[in-house]
Image (cartoon, rainbow, N blue to C red):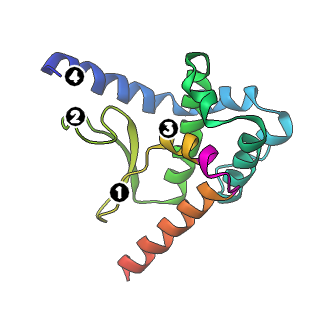
Amino acid sequence: MNKEEKERRKDDFEAWVTFIPDEVAELKKMLPKELSETLDYSINSLNNLEKYLLQSYSSETFVNAENKILLDRLARYIGLTFKRNIPTSYWDIELDDEKDVYYTLPVIKIKDINLAPFSPHMLVTTTLDRERGTFLSSILENTRKVIEKKSN
């Protein structure tokens, strides 16, 4: 990727982050009202969302281009929920290492702790593949426990 393309992608990423709240609001309009009302960025809200996703979609659903917007909005909600529940987390994007598994994808990283980043986009499809119902919340809770251990 040349310098100009990298700058454009960085600008696109910054705009993407800026519009997260707007896109989450649009996601809530797309979902059933009874689910939308529970999406309060809590750990339990991830279970509610995951249950709905498992009942309504398969991972193949998000391979189709027509579901790109839904996938992106789901990823934004999941990422924002992680971010709000992990105070030292922040959004980032890898634009240098083309071999990085998260190359060009928005990720959540944890400041000052060496943990693998989370790709909310990948978490959506992995959630559907795992079919657990508590996959997202368990990742978030386990991450919080690791951070707490390393902080003590």
Closer mark to the observer between disc 1 and disc 2? 2
* Residue at x 75% of width, y 48% of height: 51
Q: Position of residue 29 (x, y in %)?
A: 75, 27
Mark 1 → mark 2, Cα distance in angstroms: 17 Å
* Residue at x 44% of width, y 76% of height: 148
Residue 23 figure quarter: top right
Instruction: State which tag comes first along the sequence, 1 or 4.
Output: 4
Mark 1 → mark 4, Cα distance in angstroms: 25 Å
Mark 3 → mark 1, Cα distance in angstroms: 15 Å
Q: Which residue is identified by label 3?
A: 121
Q: Position of residue 63 (x, y in %)?
A: 55, 26
- Secondary structure under badge 1? loop
Quadrant where the N terminus is found in the figure: top left
- Secondary structure under badge 3? helix
Instruction: State which tag comes first along the sequence, 3 or 1.
Output: 1
Question: Which mark, residue 98?
Answer: 2
Question: Which mark, residue 116?
Answer: 1
Q: Residues within 10 Å of mark 2 (few under 14, many from 20)?
A: few
Q: Residue furthest left?
A: 3
State whether residue 148 is above or below residue 65.
below
Q: Which residue is identified by label 4?
A: 7
For the magenta stretch, what is the residue range?
127-133
Mark 2 → mark 4, Cα distance in angstroms: 15 Å
Q: Position of residue 60 (x, y in %)?
A: 61, 31
